[in-house]
Amino acid sequence: MEGEHTRTGKQAGISRKTLFKAALIATPVPLLIGQVPALARNAAESGEPLTPTPYCDDGDDPTPPQTEGPYFKPNSPQRAVLPGTGTPLTVSGYVFGLACQPLANVLLDFWQADRNGAYDNVTYNFRGHQYTDAQGAFKLTTILPGLYPGRTRHIHVKAQAPGRPILTTQLYFPGEPRNNTDTIFDPRLLMTVRTVGSGREATFDFVLNVPGVPPTNPPTSPPPGGGTWQVGVTYQAGDQVTYGGASYRCLQGHLAQAGWEPPNVPALWQRA
């Protein structure tokens, strides 16, 4: 099983239940059948502090939320696209701190198996790192990883905010038969996945143990770009707004924040 194992004790007391209180995001595209979590961005709308994803540090006894496994390689190339043959997959989302604020310049290092379940330990196929943008967003373009013997389908990732500890974890797919037999599988790390054409689109929001100041009451003045979009408004999927002379349709319910203007967050707004 990739030499991976679970740990008890300190890890058992850490919970991300705050992240899963929100309802599922409405979408016209069918979700894959199985367990499907809500996203941290929805829980953040309540204004309550987010429960951190468990993380490990660089000490002698890290106690990570998920084991690194034997196939991690440092010094991966900086890239957001991991080219290869297989079912197309995109993974996108945001990285938040404890105060529900998106975190910019977070290092995200991804590695995974190819479509046959094999890891490349010679070169850097299906390995790469990237940084979150000014809005805390990331997007990985890759393929659906194959099944490794003894494991369910998964993607490895390390996440580190500037000057903060490293989170080492794995992301999982809903509806996988092996989710029920994989002793490492953790439903708190399920992505939200939907089928789009011949490919898959997945979303997941990380919450790191980074303190901060909760968002204050936002201004109600018109946005700089002009239009009906407003900071501090809770938008639902299907809502229509204007910004900068253009019309946009809301794709996912969220609380509008400064920096999340429709042109800046295509995961939330689509040009109408």
Image: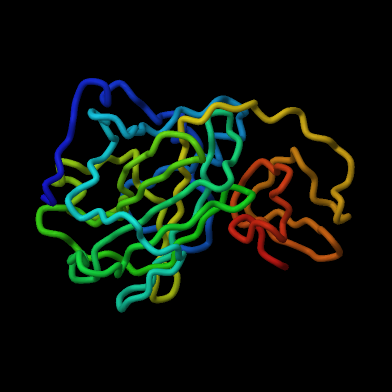
In the displayed orientation, state which residue is furthest to the bottom. Answer: 85
The quadrant holding residue 124 is: bottom left
- Is residue 235 visible in the rendered image? The answer is yes
Residue 150: x, y in percent?
A: 10, 53
Q: Identify the residue at image location x=69%, y=49%.
A: 260
Left or right: where 144 falls relative to 102: left
User: For the C terminus, which image quadrant?
Assistant: bottom right
- Is residue 30 visible in the rendered image? The answer is no
Left or right: where 45 falls relative to 115: right
97 vs 232, nearest the viewer: 97
Left or right: where 85 falls relative to 179: right
47 vs 209, nearest the viewer: 209
119 vs 175, nearest the viewer: 119
Residue 182: x, y in percent?
A: 15, 46
Left or right: where 60 falls relative to 21: left
The quadrant holding residue 48 is: top right
Residue 241 sits above or below residue 216 on the image: below
Residue 118 sits above or below residue 208 on the image: below
Q: Identify the residue at image location x=53%, y=39%.
A: 96
The quadrant holding residue 7 is: top left
Q: Identify the residue at image location x=21%, y=48%.
A: 179
158 vs 12, nearest the viewer: 158
The total of numbered circles placed on residues is: 0
Q: Identify the residue at image location x=53%, y=34%.
A: 97
Residue 40 sits above or below residue 8 on the image: below
Residue 34: x, y in percent?
A: 31, 50
